[in-house]
Image: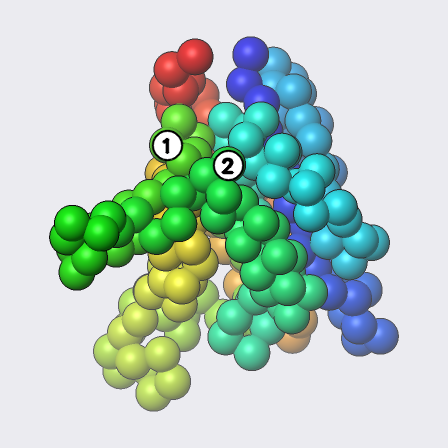
Amino acid sequence: MQKTLIINGHQPYDFSEGGLNSAFVERAVAQLQELGHRIQVTEVAKGYDVEAEVARHQWADNVIMQFPVNWMGVPWSFKKYIDEVYTAGLDGRMCANDGRVAENPKANYGTGGSLTNGRYMMSVTFNAPREAFDDAQEPFFRGASVDDMLFPMHLNARFVGLSPLPTFAAFDVMKNPETDSDLANWDAHLNTVFAAAAAPAA
């Protein structure tokens, strides 16, 4: 049986209370339970216990990070969560420091991750339209992909040893939302990824 931790990293604002990100989390819980997963959910904005979150990462075969992209990064409360939880896990539970050894201190930075049997997936929401990405003629992102935008988060996950699953993104969610389509696409993405992804070794 797969064990999946879902982290809702949305930070509520008056203009963005988090309904869409919560809907993605709820759909993921339902979909993955149907596929036989045991689920734990952390809603960062409601508070968390750092030691419990380290233990949840150790428990999980899969970590799903659900969040809006705010000012080209994760919401501040989710960044705080990462700073606190991942730093607490530096004692070997999530990673053995930064992976370097005294005998060769210049090599292998970032290879000390302890969660090497785990995988992670990011599911993100953008105000930007889909057409703003992967197009060198677009003046802002200049050809960057969604995963290019999320590169620091990919590195954080790699630092603790997690392996990537395909990213999911919903676009233009503020000005031109297509919520029903986004939720249907999310259901399909989860089913495809988790039906296809082999279970980690016990």
Residue 150, image x, y percentages: 42, 62
Residue toward you, 139 or 13: 13
Q: In which quarter of the image is the N terminus?
A: top right
Residue occupying the point 31% across, 71% down = 144
Q: Quadrant of residue 84?
A: bottom right
Query: Residue 168, can we see it?
Result: yes
Residue 50, image x, y percentages: 69, 47
Answer left or right for 92 relative to 99: right
In the image, what residue type sits under mark 1? Thr
Nearer to us of marks 2 and 1 is 2
Q: In this view, does 179 lie above or below 197?
A: below
Residue 64, image x, y percentages: 55, 41
Q: In which quarter of the image is the C terminus?
A: top left
Answer left or right for 12 relative to 120: right
In the image, what residue type sits under mark 2? Arg
Q: How many numbered tags mark residues here?
A: 2
Crowd class of label 2 (few under 14; some 14 to 19; many from 20; radius 10 Å)? some
Residue occupying the point 58% across, 26% down = 59
Q: Mark 2 points at which residue?
A: 93
Q: In this view, does 55 lie above or below 24?
A: above
Residue toward you, 164 or 155: 155
- Nearer the N terminus, badge 2 or badge 1? 2
Please give the label number shown on residue 116: 1
Residue 60, image x, y percentages: 55, 28
Q: Is residue 49 above or below residue 134?
A: above
Color encoding of the figure: rainbow
Residue reaching furthest to the front = 102
Q: Is mark 2 on a helix, strand or loop?
A: loop
Q: Quadrant of residue 82?
A: bottom right
Crowd class of label 1 (few under 14; some 14 to 19; many from 20; radius 10 Å)? some
Answer left or right for 26 relative to 168: right
Q: In this view, does 47 lie above or below 2?
A: below
